[in-house]
Image (tube, rainbow, N blue to C red):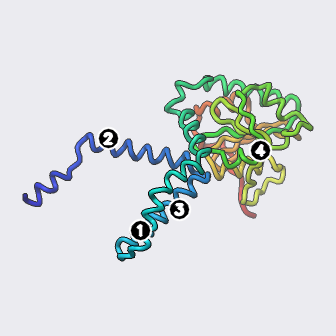
Amino acid sequence: MSPLDELLLLRPGWKDLVQILLVAAGLYRLLLLVQRTRAMQMLLGLVLVASVYLAAVLLGLDLIRYLLAQLFQYGAIAALVVFQPELRSALARLGQSRMMRVFARMEESQVVDEIVEAVERLCRSKIGAIIAIEQNVGLEEYADTGSPVEARVSAEMLNTIFTPYSPLHDGAVLISGDQIRAAGAILPLTQYSVSDRSLGTRHRAALGLSEETDAVVVVVSEETSRVSVARAGRFERDVSSERLREILEGTVPETAAGIGLRIARGG
């Protein structure tokens, strides 16, 4: 067989390309599910162990290769037991993915309506609030800092949570799909200096979360009753109900010129 014939055998067909794309999409989705969880630490550990095993094979280190082979044989079963909560959470999130949204229990428009109504009520009552809406990046790490709720999104529930002097009113509410996942959650403050001194702890926490994840974070100021939205490390101030609805429905580009307000850092 000539070298040209060998190259032709390696030429991928359309089926091969489809399979490659499906596998790549599956791996990408898997990484999104496990990032910021103990499962990601486990995955990195497996990569390290596999690298050591490969080095042992290449260098002829039979004892190390044998021990690692035994670890691979029984380690998978142990991992399933130890990381069962993470696997269950990942499967649950897979069911909430955008590809499966057609099977969701509540229409997205309903969720947006409930959030907008809740924000309007909070503004009228001059009650401060911070609401984080999960996107592709999971918020499990931050949900663990609060109290689990697992209730359907509703304006009444959100207003109840943020009622002054209630046990959970100081923290953030985390929304995943059509569910309020946690309340009273602690969010990371932005690590950058903020020139606008009027921004309080809620605003800094919203900005910090938007820097670390792709969540959309809505903040209601207790002092001014103004609404702000943090996305991708940017703040948009004085957001109206109509504008908030557009943002939550994803109808307006995130970096629309002249609308988003970038918080000045440094100085």
Mark 3–mark 4 Cα distance, whole angstroms, equals: 28 Å
Disc 3, disc 4: CB below 8 Å? no
What residue lies at 66% left-to-right and 23% top-to-bottom?
Answer: 110
Q: Nearer the viewer, residue 232 or 39?
A: 39
Give the foreground label among 3 and 1.
Answer: 1
Instruction: Name which residue type carries label 2.
Output: Val
Q: Earlier in the sequence, mark 2 or mark 1?
A: 2
Answer few, some or many: residues within 10 Å of disc 4's Cα (few below 14, many 20 plus, some between 14 and 19).
many
Q: Position of residue 129 (x, y in %)?
A: 81, 38
Instruction: Name which residue type carries label 1.
Output: Tyr
Give the labeled residue for mark 1: 66
Instruction: Name which residue type carries label 3.
Output: Gly
Answer few, some or many: residues within 10 Å of disc 1's Cα (few below 14, many 20 plus, some between 14 and 19).
some
Answer few, some or many: residues within 10 Å of disc 2's Cα (few below 14, many 20 plus, some between 14 and 19).
few
What residue lies at 15% left-to-right and 52% top-to-bottom?
Answer: 8
Disc 3, disc 1: CB below 8 Å? no
Mark 3–mark 1 Cα distance, whole angstroms, equals: 18 Å
Give the foreground label among 2 and 4.
Answer: 4
What residue lies at 71% left-to-right and 48% top-to-bottom?
Answer: 142
Answer few, some or many: residues within 10 Å of disc 3's Cα (few below 14, many 20 plus, some between 14 and 19).
few
Mark 2–mark 1 Cα distance, whole angstroms, equals: 37 Å
Q: Please, which residue is most extreme toward the right here?
A: 165
